Amino acid sequence: MSKPYHFIRALFLKGLLSVRRGVRLGLLTFGLLFISQPGFTQDETAETSLQQEPQEKQESEEDRLKREQLERVKKQIRQSEKSIENQQVKHQFLTNLLKKSEREISDVARQLNTIKSDKKNNRQKLSNLETEQAELTRERDQNKKLLAGQLSSMYVNGSHDYSKLLLNQQEPGKLERVLGYYEYLNRARTKNLDRIETILVRLSEIDVQLGETINELNGLEQQQLKKQSQLTNHQKSRRKTISQIRKRLKTESQQLEQLKINEQNLTAALARIKSLVTEAIELAGLSHLKGHLGWPVNGNLSNKFGRKRRGSLRWKGVVIHSTTGTPVKTVQQGLVLFADWLKGFGWVIVVDHGDSYMSLYGHNQTLLKAVGEKVEAGEPIALVGKSGGQSKAGLYFEIRHQGIAINPAVWCKAGV
């Protein structure tokens, strides 16, 4: 309010209280007229606007700064989300690239393993045929010596000389008997020699065929080795891919998060295959074999069960370091429930042993069995490798009962 207003109001009230009744009425009328004048109202409103205008202007400036700051934060969030999305896409691309490379290596390793097995079988067959051939050759030589000795004896012993016997007509009965005897012996020996000659010819043919087969297998093996050499280049790029993946998982929290994701993938896979367990094949489980199971592969045991892995995670199995290509053997009779590539574990095969017992074998170079196949204790089911992004060859091995991991060292024999 303006100062003139306060002054007039004070005078008005003072006069109102001090004058007589009639004069009071006049003053009251005057005061009301004064207060209601337009000039008075406009002056006060103007003064109030002048006081509020800087405050509103100040508040508007603060709001603008806050809005700008909020927009910057939103922009940073959008950029971070985009960066994370790009990183996830790149990580998935690298993972798919790793899977493709390891699948190619697996295919070649399986083919090489088949070729080596065929060569071994053919060489064993060739060895058996060569042994048989040698025995038949000795038998033939012995029969030749016997025949030569008999002929020599007949020639030396004049009484058995054909020419003398034929000219000697005094003992026709003896002549008939002797001729019949020698004819029988000669037919038997001739038949035996013919059989031996036939067998040896056939063995010679088989030997040629086996030689050609071995040459062909050697050629195939050379081709496969050449292809493996080409895949070595892919392995180099695989190592580069793994290096890139690890660079993207620099921090402890990122690595821990990835391990958790890998473990969740494994748990989910095991949960899916749990429904596939069938009682069509009678399996006895493992409870009666505690402490007597054989290890799936020989090697150096590391990353033992229950030890701290990273953060709150602990090892639910063991890693057995061994040579690439070493056969991985199932610990007991069972049925293959899972055989595929799994992120973080590479080529994995899971065997159901019955009574809610399972064994799991990971990081393999290749798998030798498919889902649904029955396997016997000690039967090769895979080859040791370093799939799943490992830098050192080895086997990841788990035993589970009712879905819960149990210590393999307690169930397998002492010493790996």
Image (cartoon, grey):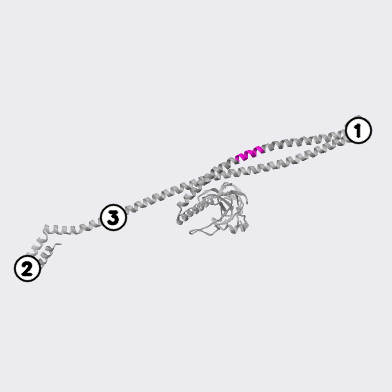
Query: Where residue 68 appears, x then y in whole percent?
Result: 30, 53
What quarter of the picture does the C terminus occupy? bottom right
Q: Residue at x 72, y 42 (%)?
A: 131
The amino acid type, in three-letter code, at marker 1 is Gly
Say if mark 3 contacts mark 1, CB within 8 Å.
Answer: no
Q: Which residue is mark 3?
A: 65
First in residue order: circle 2 vs circle 1: 2
Q: Is residue 392 left or right of residue 84?
A: right
In this view, the residue in front, 106 or 233, is: 233
Q: Residues within 10 Å of mark 1 (few under 14, many from 20)?
A: few
Q: CA distance from mark 3 to mark 1?
A: 142 Å
Q: CA distance from mark 3 to mark 2?
A: 62 Å
Q: Residues within 10 Å of mark 2 (few under 14, many from 20)?
A: few
Q: Which numbered dot is residue 23?
A: none
Asked which secondary structure carries label 3, the reply is: helix
In this view, the residue in front, 128 or 265, is: 128
Q: Is residue 101 left or right of residue 66?
A: right
Residue 201 counted in the magenta span = no
First in residue order: circle 3 vs circle 2: 2
The amino acid type, in three-letter code, at marker 3 is Leu
Against 171, is 314 above or below? below
Q: Where are the magenta residues, as a range?
A: 211-220
**Tag nearer the camera, 3 or 1:** 3
First in residue order: circle 3 vs circle 1: 3
The amino acid type, in three-letter code, at marker 2 is Arg
Q: Which numbered dot is residue 173?
A: 1
Q: Residues within 10 Å of mark 3 (few under 14, many from 20)?
A: few
Q: Which residue is mark 2?
A: 21
Q: CA distance from mark 2 to mark 1?
A: 196 Å
Query: Where residue 219 appears, x then y in whole percent?
Result: 61, 39
Asked which secondary structure carries label 2, the reply is: helix
Query: Where residue 353 appears, x then y in whole percent?
Result: 59, 53
